[in-house]
Image (cartoon, coloured by chain):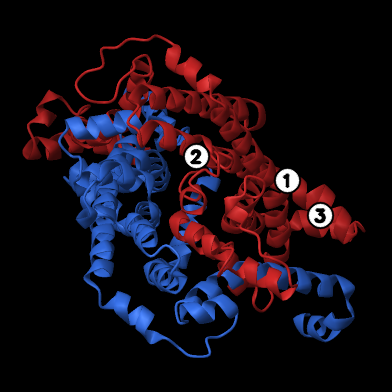
Chain colours: A red, B blue
């Protein structure tokens, strides 16, 4: 405190010799310069490439427009009607729902179980952690291609297993019955390691004395886990669920090399549906309408989730 | 403790179950990866009858042909340029903004910060068509910047949050003392904040790099010329050309994910910290 009082006149003197802004008085010193130099680049880029396009999507979605010239053919809410009347859109929405379901019901419990095992120190634990995390850093495109080989009906691993049992190998990705299931397996393969790492980080940050206290009080391993460790992990679990859902909603890259959303739209996600119907055909209005719907879903979800489950954070 | 654990392990059903479980998952993760690397060493005929095992005859030619092709290096070069642009710009722009948010109190500060964090709530894909039109109107279509600038913009929210939290931990007394000694805010930023923040800069740089290096949708929309394609686009084209010659495609996949894997092994600490960083509240 004493230092602060002593320093304020000194700032004035020092700054005066440095810059002319200090003439306005010690209160402004160099801060004004920082603000006008340091903030605009970030705000400008963010506004230009993130915020404005969302607003424009809402505007374009009211036109029938192929992207050339200016939009003139105003059709009101028709694009939204067209989207909602498309069966493929509902299929895509259902698939996103399936992805979320699998993420929550299979991926997260798997990640949690592995985290509980690998958070302890034993030989090989670190290597296993890294191995399980590896799929997450691989590009989705590469992952998709690797698995389109795995599933390939002629050369793939699955085909080979089938043949050893003497059965005719299926073309998993080419059938409307199995394509989405195949995609879901790849999703678990690719993302469980990320959630596992989140849980491991949280477990290592836990207050060990609570666990020890429970042990001393005679709690069994299972009881400690159920009543002490897992409740302590709730904040991380909530966060993990949040990431899983937001991530599922934007899934695209993985689908393209596997199925491109096919066959017959059976494995489209919202974004691949947007790509196949809006972007690749340059139907700007229609595509923007899909984008706006996706945006509304994401933002509604994010706000509701934060309000209901993450109030304290 | 651990020594007794090891000798007792075979008789402990829980430990056995755990080992089996871990081994199963390890196989589940490893087999597709190994089959890909090894598949690149096989001939197409052998791949069909022996997709799992070691190659009976190692075909180095598959890999050599790709490694000596201009195409492979051009893809990597394009990816590297785009990622380097994205990382450099993100680090400069985000650290400047984070510094202002961390050390300067001004009216509207928290409002502007929440404005930036809106970027965390929705994916780039939602507005990709208007983004395409915007990039086209700016004359950036089919340029490296047309891909890198939107990537920077979308990585800003997370980057600013992470950097700001770190900058805030730099003791205020340090800034005060520097100001007393006649150092300006900008010099303080350049000569104190940035050097002290190397770990978080490395983390933010790594996240941005991995995201940009792996990105598919933005370059797909923004680039039309094959010569500018980064590797995820290039490998899709390659796969289109060689549709069922899987031994070549597998070799190509292996060589394109190799840089990522090497980077991962070299910088695992930063990658793990960076990619799970959202977990620690910003």
Callouts 2 and 3 close, C-beta under 8 Å: no
Please give the label number shown on residue A225.
3
Task: Give residue A281's position: percent from left, percent from top.
Answer: 35, 33
Q: In the displayed structure, does residue B269 sit left or right of residue B194?
A: right
Label 3 Cα neighbours within 10 Å, binned few <14 / some 14-19 / many ≥20:
some
Pointer 2 chain? A
Pointer 3 chain? A
Please identify, in this view, whether the residue under mark 2 or under mark 3 is nearer the observer. Answer: 2
Pointer 1 chain? A
Task: Give residue B68's position: percent from left, percent from top.
Answer: 25, 78
Disc 1 from disc 2: Cα separation? 19 Å
Say if B193 sits above or below A130 in the image: above
- Residue hosting label 1: A105
| Residue at figure coordinates x 21%, y 50% from the top left | B225
Please give the label number shown on residue A162.
none
Please give the label number shown on residue A250.
2
Disc 1 from disc 3: Cα separation? 19 Å
Find numbered disc 1 in the image and state the secondary structure of the residue it sits on: helix
Find numbered disc 2 in the image and state the secondary structure of the residue it sits on: loop
Residue B110 makes an appearance in the image:
yes
Q: In the displayed structure, does residue B221 sit left or right of residue A101?
A: left
A248, A197: nearer the viewer: A248
Task: Give residue A113's position: percent from left, percent from top.
Answer: 74, 58
Q: Which numbered disc, 1 or 2, marks the residue that appears first in the sequence?
A: 1
């Amino acid at each position: 405190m004493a230092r602060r009082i002593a320093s304020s006149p000194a700032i004035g003197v020092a700054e005066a010799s440095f810059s002319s802004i200090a003439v306005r008085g010690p209160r402004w010193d160099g801060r004004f310069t920082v603000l006008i130099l340091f903030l605009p680049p970030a705000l400008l880029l963010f506004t230009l490439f993130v915020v404005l396009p969302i607003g424009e999507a809402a505007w374009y979605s009211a036109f029938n427009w192929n992207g050339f010239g200016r939009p003139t053919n105003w059709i009101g809410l028709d694009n939204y009607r067209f989207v909602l009347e498309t069966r493929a859109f509902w299929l895509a929405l259902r698939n996103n729902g399936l992805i979320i379901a699998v993420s929550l019901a299979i991926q997260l419990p798997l990640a949690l179980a592995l985290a509980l095992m690998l958070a302890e120190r034993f030989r090989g634990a670190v290597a296993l952690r890294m191995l399980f995390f590896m799929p997450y850093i691989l590009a989705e495109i590469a992952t998709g291609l690797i698995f389109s080989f795995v599933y390939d009906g002629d050369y793939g691993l699955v085909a080979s297993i089938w043949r050893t049992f003497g059965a005719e190998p299926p073309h998993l990705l080419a059938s409307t019955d199995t394509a989405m299931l195949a995609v879901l397996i790849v999703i678990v393969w690719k993302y469980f390691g990320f959630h596992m790492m989140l849980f491991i980080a949280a477990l290592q940050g836990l207050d060990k004395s609570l666990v020890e206290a429970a042990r001393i009080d005679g709690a069994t391993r299972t009881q400690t886990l159920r009543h002490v460790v897992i409740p302590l992990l709730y904040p991380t679990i909530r966060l993990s669920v949040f990431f899983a859902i937001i991530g599922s909603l934007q899934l695209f890259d993985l689908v393209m090399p596997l199925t491109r959303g096919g066959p017959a739209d059976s494995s489209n996600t919202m974004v691949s549906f947007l790509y196949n119907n809006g972007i690749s055909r340059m139907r700007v209005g229609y595509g923007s309408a899909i984008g706006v719907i996706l945006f509304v879903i994401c933002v509604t979800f994010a706000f509701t989730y934060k309000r209901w489950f993450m109030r304290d954070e | 403790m651990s020594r007794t654990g090891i000798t007792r392990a075979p008789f402990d059903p829980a430990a056995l179950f755990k080992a089996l479980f871990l081994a199963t998952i390890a196989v589940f993760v490893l087999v597709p990866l190994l089959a890909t690397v090894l598949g690149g060493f096989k001939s197409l005929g052998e791949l069909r009858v022996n997709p799992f095992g070691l190659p009976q005859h190692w075909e180095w030619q598959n890999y050599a042909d790709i490694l000596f092709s201009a195409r492979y290096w051009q893809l990597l070069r394009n990816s590297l340029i785009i990622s380097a642009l994205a990382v450099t710009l993100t680090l400069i722009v985000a650290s400047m903004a984070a510094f202002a948010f961390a050390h300067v109190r001004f009216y509207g500060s928290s409002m502007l910060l929440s404005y930036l964090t809106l970027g965390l709530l929705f994916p780039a894909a939602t507005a990709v068509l208007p983004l395409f039109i915007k990039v086209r109107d700016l004359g950036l279509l089919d340029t490296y910047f047309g891909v890198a600038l939107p990537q920077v913009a979308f990585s800003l929210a997370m980057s600013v949050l992470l950097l700001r939290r770190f900058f805030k931990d730099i003791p205020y007394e340090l800034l005060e003392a520097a100001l007393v000694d006649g150092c300006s805010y900008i010099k303080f930023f350049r000569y104190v904040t940035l050097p002290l923040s190397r770990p978080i800069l490395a983390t933010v740089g790594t996240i941005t790099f991995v995201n940009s290096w792996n990105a598919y949708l933005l370059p797909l929309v923004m680039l039309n010329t094959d010569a500018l394609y980064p590797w995820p686009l290039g490998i899709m084209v390659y796969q289109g050309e060689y549709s069922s010659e899987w031994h070549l495609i597998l070799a190509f996949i292996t060589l394109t994910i190799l840089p990522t894997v090497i980077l991962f092994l070299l910088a695992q600490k930063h990658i793990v910290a960076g990619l799970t960083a959202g977990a620690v509240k910003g």
